[in-house]
Amino acid sequence: MAVTATGTAHKKRNGANGRRPAKTSSRIKRVLGPGLITGASDDDPSGIGTYSQAGAQFGFAISWTMLFSYPLMVAIQVVSARIGRTTGRGIAGNIRRHYPNWLLQSIVALLLIANTINIGADLGAMADAVRMLAGGPHLLYVALFGLLCAVLQVFTKYGRYAALLRSLTLALLAYFGTVMVVRIPWAEAARGLLIPTFAWDSAFWTTVVAILGTTISPYLFFWQAAQEVEDIRAVRERKPLIKAPEQGNDAIERIRFDTYVGMALSNLVALAIIVTTAATLHANGLTDIATSSQAAEALRPVAGPFAFTLFTLGIVGTGLLAVPVLAGSAAYAVGEARRWPVGLARKPMQAKAFYVTLTLATLAGASMNFFPISPIKALYWTAVINGVVAVPVMVTMMHMTSNPKIMGDFPINDGLRLIGWLSTAVMAVAAVAMGITAGM
């Protein structure tokens, strides 16, 4: 009888055929979400250009910045996610409720400007990539990519759209592929990663500032917090932790794992780009790379057509992931500041102003490519604006995490608080360094 009962229980637990149901993919989707997408979107075409320039100009000697920045970006993104999951509101929503209006309006306005410029630069890079692969008119590709990104966000159901964004993270594998097809002096690459080296000139420190500004960027804070709020709405049993404290341990562990994985993927891809360009472009004296498309074009004669194709396809894939995140984070910030109904889980007629803002940010970014605006100068000013915005946003976020009116029974621990404030201090120093080097 005992054997029969055990067998019956086993069948009930695993199904009539005694096999365990296939739930692995479902579990992965529930654990890996906002952090994974946020980390992957950090490697947008503009970021690829920054990492390519770093590797081409300084070789392996700059790669230590990826190891240095990893704990800093993890800490601030965990803080962002914790704020959203605990309160059920995004960053802007919490600033609106607890901080002066002038601070809210200033941050949101600067974020909207920076994101719109970044969208324009990314769409331009994607169009250049397709033109290099297939030929055709650059501006037509810009318009088509802009419309595609806007339409998908407005008319695709949130569950399907989130799954699409997760799938697009696979585009980052292209950069691991380029590492596999070029010759890397691994001993030299390891030294550059593990032993920090410094050059006491403005070009080096400007590059370090650019890398930090790319890996720790305000739009990532707003997006990850907002996506935690979206997941609360999308998963019926989830509630803000201040209302359902019993969900706290599981939610915090999920956020930690999701963010660790997402940021690790982001930095590994960035490292792959730096290593690839260091081993090919820098090694052959090609040190002046300004955009991701220039990096791809320069790779063709040095590393071969296959590496060129992989690198170029990666630009398109990462752009399709990053543009919606840039537009979405801007729309969340503006909507929360204005007390509009917000969220990709809402139907367009339920959040008209939110979707209009999202669409206008995308189309305004696309329109920049139709005017004689230098993409290099545009990206420079984006970095400046992001550097200005990041510090007050990070200071405000860190202050939120110690405010019991906001976090209730879920303040962050001392270790996370220490690294979070260290990340904030590093970004403040970077912003000052950017200003000093700009005037040199």
Image (tube, helix red, strand yellow):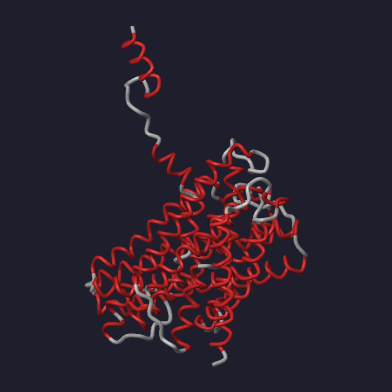
Left or right, 325 with reference to 291: right
Q: Residue at x 67, y 57 (%)?
A: 400
> Eyeballing the image, is 254 above or below 389?
above
Q: Residue at x 63, y 43 (%)?
A: 241
> Eyeballing the image, is 232 above or below 147?
above
- Percent across and percent down for residue 288 are 38, 86
- Percent across and percent down for residue 289 are 39, 82
432 or 230, which is in the foreground?
432
Left or right, 22 with reference to 425: left
Left or right, 185 with reference to 258: left
Which quadrant is the N terminus positioned in? top left
Please identify the residue farthest to the right as the structure is shown: 101
Which quadrant is the C terminus positioned in? bottom right
Left or right, 244 with reference to 55: right
Q: Residue at x 52, y 78 (%)?
A: 379
Please identify the residue farthest to the bottom as the structure is shown: 440
343 or 412, which is in the foreground?
412
Please identify the residue farthest to the top as the structure is shown: 1
> Eyeballing the image, is 51 above or below 247?
below
- Percent across and percent down for residue 33 are 49, 49
374 or 34, which is in the foreground?
34
- Percent across and percent down for residue 90 are 65, 55
> Residue 363's quadrant in the figure?
bottom right
